[in-house]
Image (cartoon, grey):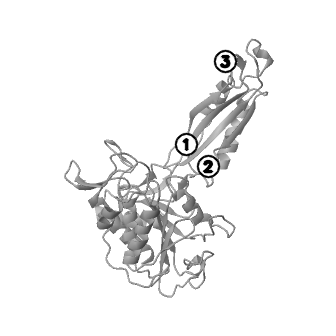
Amino acid sequence: MSEEGGSGVASAFDPVAFLAEAVPVESHESSDEMRGFLVDTLAEHGVEARVDNAGNVRATRRADGDTGAAAGETPDGAARGPADDDLDGPHLVLNTHIDTVPPHVEFERGTDDAGREVFRGRGSCDAKGPLAALLAGFLAVEPARGAVTLAVTPDEETLSTGADALVRGRGADHPDGPVDPVGGDLFLVGEPTDCDVCVAARGRFEGTLTLTGSAAHAAEPGSGVNAVAALEDALAAVRAFDDGAATHPLLGGPTLVPTGVAGGEATNQVPARATVTLDRRSVPPETAEGFREALASAVHGAVADEVGVAFELTDRPTPFLEAFDTDPEHPLATAVRDAARAVGGSGDGERRPFGAATEASYFAPAPTVVFGPGHLADGDGAVAHSEREYVRVDRVRDAAEAVRRAVGTLVG
């Protein structure tokens, strides 16, 4: 077995002890300290990881004889990961993120109402608990074929520039420096699923619908074109946009919600402009660009001919998180399901959608599964991103053992 940039042999790794040290590390404003802690942890267990120019922590373990492109160099001067075309087996990528949302919530050990040990604090379930599980699998495996790469991103909660660079790479002309893409045949993404196997998730798009008319004195409304009045027909088109649309077998139907509106400049003037902000939760196979074109066309057909219609997606430097789905019977999904059931019992490993948009969408259409300990929400309300964020310690151990088994099945 060889390691990207490493020379040691991985020693025993305790995911719970790791998590107890990781949660107190504040990572809501900067990922730097948490990234350093992760790199140091890998080094302590025999793996010398590298940090690419997008801030991703990356390390690869290959089967004996699968040298890939390790002898080459990436544009940023670090050893390459495996060249997938040269691998005798699949390239499995383990991905999650080290950033958290504000505000930081202090770490606390405690018990839940059933007397089970829990860790509370920001990042305990989103996503340092899942990271602990992925690390357990990565450090335990000795690939017999193919390779496994750990690729941990710094900014999933904001703009996903790290994941974007992992997928699309960056050339030498990028202001922050080049990044080689991770490649990969299979992706296991760590998020709080309570050890369910999430094989699909909705996407999330946002855009602004702009209607234009012509200003006039309000005493002579017929001499102008009222953009605010045109909202009536435009919003009717928005409400009807998904009428008759096919539903996804796992995700159901998409949603389209107006979340903001503005228009008019003076109270005695026919308004020449009105805008509506729209939130879209998509299902496959809809893409961001396909949605943009279809929405603009639908509204244009609903309003008067003299009303101008434009719909533009909110500008961002990285792609929107689009919807994705993976065949629930794909070997990746079944390997994680079987491992989760073997560890936690028949109640674990349910194959279902994930409840939030996720960077996992960047890796599709390659087979992608979302998995980890913790909940987005429980019977008492929000967990992830909330003041009461927590993870059960026994579920961290379950998830870690499930990842070890699944990774072993896939490449071990």
Q: Name the residue under label 3.
A: 267
The label on residue 14 is none
Tell me if 268 is positioned left or right of 72 in this view: right
Q: Which amino acid does label 1 sit on?
A: Pro
Q: Mark 2 points at which residue?
A: 286
Q: What residue type is labelled 3?
A: Thr
Q: Residue 109: where, in percent of width, then height?
A: 25, 56
Q: Name the residue under label 1.
A: 254
Toward the viewer: 143 or 367?
143
**Farthest left residue in view:** 115
Toward the viewer: 259 or 297?
259
Q: Residue 290: where, in percent of width, then height?
A: 67, 47
Q: Residue 327: where, in percent of width, then height?
A: 51, 60
Is label 3 in a helix, a strand or a loop?
loop
How far apart are the alpha carbons under marks 1 and 3? 37 Å
Q: Can residue 317 be seen in this view?
A: yes
Kindly identify the residue that appears in the image at 36 percent across and 55 percent down: 125
Which class describes the residues within 10 Å of circle 3: few (<14), some (14-19), or many (20+)? few
Tell me where residue 169 sits by quadrant: bottom right
Is label 2 in a helix, a strand or a loop?
loop
Q: Earlier in the sequence, mark 1 or mark 3?
A: 1
Q: Are marks 3 and 2 in contact (CB under 8 Å)?
A: no
Above or below 220: residue 248: below
Q: Which amino acid does label 2 sit on?
A: Glu
Q: Do the residues labelled 2 and 1 touch (CB within 8 Å)?
A: yes
Q: Earlier in the sequence, mark 2 or mark 1?
A: 1
Kindly identify the residue that appears in the image at 46 percent across and 82 percent down: 6
How far apart are the alpha carbons under marks 3 and 2? 40 Å
